[in-house]
């Protein structure tokens, strides 16, 4: 399984809010995992998370 570094970034200023390592498998992609982590950390729902943040793979 391939490990990826995933970043959740702010839509406002492009700053990295969360960075974590993710092992991608067929059931959970980086976007689902990224939004799940930011929702849990900030106590917000997925709609709020998608309005404020975006998920990307780190270079």
Image (spheres, helix red, strand yellow):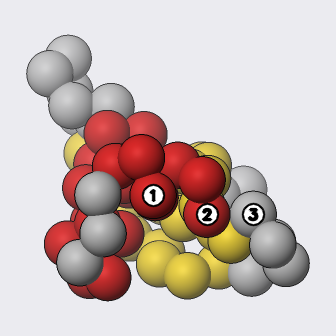
Q: Residue 14 versus residue 19: which sits nearer the camera?
A: 14
Residue located farthest toward the left when viewing the structure as drawn: 27
Q: Categorize mark 3 by other alpha carbons within 10 Å: few (<14), some (14-19), many (20+).
A: some
Q: Is residue 11 left or right of residue 25?
A: right
Which residue shows up at 61% across the image and 63% down it? 52
Give how far across and how far down residue 33 sits, in percent: 28, 48
Calculate the distance from the C-alpha at mark 2 to the C-alpha at mark 1: 6 Å
Which residue shows up at 20% across the image and 17% down it? 26
Q: Categorize mark 2 by other alpha carbons within 10 Å: few (<14), some (14-19), many (20+).
A: few
Residue named by callout 1: 48
Give how far across and how far down residue 12 sits, in percent: 81, 72
Q: Residue 46 versus residue 57: which sits nearer the camera?
A: 46
Q: Is residue 22 visible?
A: no
Mark 3 lies on a secondary structure that is loop
Instruction: Please report contact status of discs 2 and 3: CB closer than 8 Å, yes or no.
Output: yes
Residue named by callout 2: 52
Mark 2 lies on a secondary structure that is helix
Residue named by callout 3: 11
Quarter holding the N terminus is: top left
Q: Earlier in the sequence, mark 2 or mark 3?
A: 3
Q: Residue 53 versus residue 31: which sits nearer the camera?
A: 53
Frontmost of labels 1 and 3 is 1
Instruction: Please report contact status of discs 2 and 1: CB closer than 8 Å, yes or no.
Output: yes
Which residue shows up at 85% across the image and 78% down it? 13
Q: Categorize mark 1 by other alpha carbons within 10 Å: few (<14), some (14-19), many (20+).
A: few
Q: Is residue 7 left or right of residue 10?
A: left
Quarter holding the C terminus is: bottom right
Mark 1 lies on a secondary structure that is helix
Query: In this rendering, is residue 3 above or below 1?
Result: below
Residue located farthest toward the right when viewing the structure as drawn: 13
């Amino acid at each position: 399984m391939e490990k990826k570094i995933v970043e959740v970034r702010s839509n406002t200023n492009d700053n990295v809010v969360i960075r974590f390592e993710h092992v991608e498998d067929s059931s959970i992609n980086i976007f689902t995992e990224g939004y799940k982590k930011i929702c849990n950390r900030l106590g917000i729902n997925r709609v709020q998370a998608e309005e404020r943040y975006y998920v990307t793979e780190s270079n």
